[in-house]
Image (cartoon, helix red, strand yellow):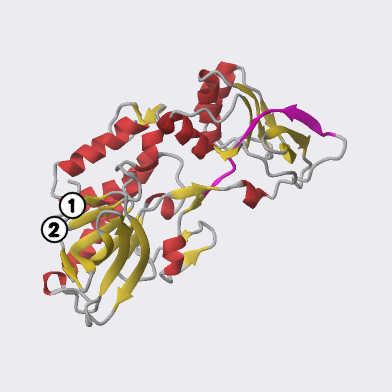
Amino acid sequence: MVAGAGWFVIRRGLAMIDVQVAVIGGGPAGLSAALECWKQGLRDILVIERDNMLGGILNQCIHAGFGLHVFGEELTGPEYAQRYVNMVKETGIKALTDTMVTSIEHVRTPDLGVGCSVKTDVPEGCIVVRAMNARDGLMDIRAKAVVLAMGCRERTRGMLRIPGTRPAGVYTAGTAQRLVNIEGFMPGREVVILGSGDIGLIMARRMTLEGAHVHGVYEVMPKSNGLRRNIVQCLDDFGIPLHLSMTAVKIHGRDRVTGVTVAKVDGSLNPIPGTEEHVSCDTVLLSVGLIPENELSRKAGIEMDPRTRGPVDKGGFMTSIPGVFACGNVFKVYDLADNVTTDSVLCGQAVANFVMEI
């Protein structure tokens, strides 16, 4: 159920919430972990989601291809997410939506109003999650265990350092996906896609279905990073060309994108002089990789793995801070939502065992 005012207490002008487990992120990872904690016998569970609804990124993934491993049938992203939302509603798991977490702190000495209350007292200390929303203001959520399930974010143009001007019309593929599928806006009509990640391939098809002209997908590597089924269903079936070993070397335009210059690259991924081509367009979509969303993790002092860019696994999905666990794309980037769910269930089991042993 979605939590509202009245189920927590106000102390010193700050809302205080005591739970056994706080899950940060209401996507497939967070919901799967929370449900498994419930199945293992925990009853004070809170899911915190910054969007206005549970389901995470799957709410904007209206294409089919989810659920084959978990449910044994092909579902769209919203259908897959809704099944978990429904299961959460059938339990006593609470959820705070439109709520932003600002910090996570491991408190070793329960004292001075920031430790655990008698309700969830932890001898070694507890974990305090500070969050805020427009309805309840600032609040401290005090838990025996915290699950990090914030997902991942896309690499942006700034990370790629593409030369040229900075006009409107350059979007990450995920942003364009939300604009089209959730907000009902078309980012543009003449489209070039840089990178062949799965979101970019899916958006090539989506933009075509909405009447846009996709000039092509340009991938710097000698082979695509996307799933083979997406290459066939999203590009081949719609006659959209895939240009391998090519990249953008300049973006043109003043107020709005007017074109992009692409060029072939050598074995070291450096542009080859003399191979430049100009492609006129009004929109550039970037599908050039995902990065685990770990700003909160770093701020909390959690040890990070430079290979995965996620928290170091100290065993059983636990991070370097006792009682703080990580699952889903915040832990490492997955290809399939079904695999996220499977691993998050294991994380939920580990969390439940940790809480019950305290």
- Residue at far right of view: 274
The residue tagged with tag 1: helix, strand or loop? loop
Instruction: Work out whether residue 112 or residue 156 is closer to the camera in this orientation and state it.
Output: 112
Q: Which residue has dot 2 on it?
A: 7
Could you say which quadrant of the image residue 28 lies in? top left
* Residues under numbered marks 1 and 2 in contact, where contact means CB atoms less than 8 Å apart: yes
133 to 246, vertically: above or below: below
Residue 281 - label: none
Q: Residues within 10 Å of mark 2 (few under 14, many from 20)?
A: few
Bounds of the magenta segment = 275-290
Task: Quarter of the image for the C terminus: give it.
Answer: bottom left
Which one is nearer the viewer's eye here, 287 or 315?
287
What's the amino acid at mark 2? Trp
Q: Is residue 60 left or right of residue 264?
A: left
| Residue found 31% across the figure and 48% down from its top | 26
Q: Height in image: 277 above or below 292?
A: above
Residue 208: quadrant of the picture:
top right
How many residues crowd around disc 1 within 10 Å: few (fewer than 14), some, or many (20 or more)? Answer: few
Q: Nearer the viewer, residue 156 or 186?
A: 186
Give me the residue at 21% from left, 59% from top.
Answer: 352
Q: Give residue 4's mark.
A: 1
Q: Is 238 left, or right, of 86 in this rendering?
A: right
- Asked whether 272 or 343 is in front, the reply is 272
Rendering quarter of residue 213: top right
